[in-house]
Image (cartoon, rainbow, N blue to C red):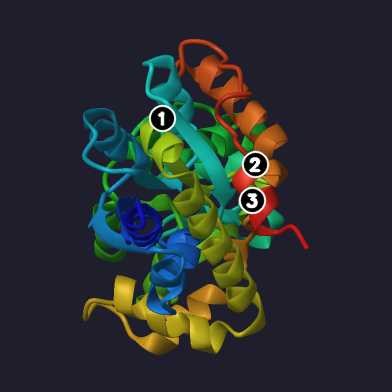
Amino acid sequence: MRLLPVFAMMLSLTGIAAAQSPVPVRVGVIPVIGAAPVFVANGEGWLKEAGLTPTFTTFESGPNMIQALASGTIDVYVAGIAPLAVARTKGIDVRVVAATAIEEMVFVAGPKLAPYFANGASKAEAFKAFKAKEGRAARLATQPPGSVPNTTLQHWLWQVVKADKADAEVVAMGIDATQQAMLAGAVDGASIREPALTIVQGRNPAIKLIATGGEMFPNQPGTVVGVFGAFADKNPAAVEGLVKAVVKATDLLKSDPARAAKPVEAALGKGITDLATIQKALTSPAAKFTADPRAIVDATKQMQAYQVSIGTLDKDVPLDGLFDPRPYEKATAR
């Protein structure tokens, strides 16, 4: 009988050890500055401190990542909000637990198209004049239909600028392909994010910023942290730790971008760019970091309604199950 307390204590210690065991988490991410809070959280060791052992897989767009989410090959989605509405219509339980950035997408024009926007000409007239002189519509690169870049570009063209659809051709391609197409002159303009904005303008100053994210879609919801429902239900403490690390990283990006640039460059650079470029990208007009998922709910509703109007979403999806602010509220509770 005397062994029972010892046995009970051993079971208790085993339970504590199990509770403290690192939680493997498979993170899907797109290689953009909007995902910087996750890169910083990992590089600073804050994900490890939260009891997480992350592995990262890079994707070219949010819609491509949805397939991995549906097949159960990733646990966490770090990409644009727009594809998640589509995912939920297909029965994929994914919950947005944090934002990372807003108003990421901007529009740039290449050397042929940019002069048409000079001297205060209306943007619709600029596209019309380009077609009249070049004999073709302006080719504008963006990511696949259903993505935030594609939705934002179409909203800007048809709702804000009110361009004639005969004057602009939207061409879908991957993130890297968009950047290369702009530099090669294969397209006339593009909706891009950082660090692509800093990179293309650094290599060719004739590429001009024509519209900021706020102009294209006010309070434009961008990259978010979405967690697969099954993972969230099994690992609530891990999800809260993940969000807490993202909040901490977001604060660092705002207060000390020079320090934050190092882990971001390690994740995004890969010999393609350098630390100075990343630091400049972190402080550009296209880098607006926020971790609060509640801040983008209204704009997400507006974006979703627009997706329905252009046919990339069948119908409005209730957002009640899409956003789960509880981990953020716990992570930021004083």
For badge 1, the amino acid type reads Gly
Q: Quick check: marks 2 and 3 in contact, CB under 8 Å?
A: yes
Mark 3 or 1, closer to the camera: 3
Q: Secondary structure at mark 1?
A: loop
**In the rendered image of this protein, does residue 233 appear above or below residue 39?**
above
**On the rendered structure, is 273 left or right of 156?**
left
Indicate which disc residue 146 carries: 1
Q: Secondary structure at mark 2?
A: loop
In depth, the one of 162 and 177 nearer the eye is 177
Q: Secondary structure at mark 3?
A: helix
Q: Quick check: marks 3 and 1 in contact, CB under 8 Å?
A: no
Q: Residue at x 48, y 50 (%)?
A: 239
Q: Residue furthest front?
A: 1
Q: Which residue is mark 2?
A: 325
Circle nearer the N terminus (1, 2):
1
Q: Decide: few, some or many residues near mark 3? Use Cα within 10 Å; few <14, some 14-19, many ≥20.
A: many
Q: Decide: few, some or many residues near mark 2? Use Cα within 10 Å; few <14, some 14-19, many ≥20.
A: some
Q: Which residue is mark 3?
A: 328
Instruction: Answer yes or no: is residue 122 visible.
Output: no
CA–CA distance in space, label 1 to label 2? 24 Å
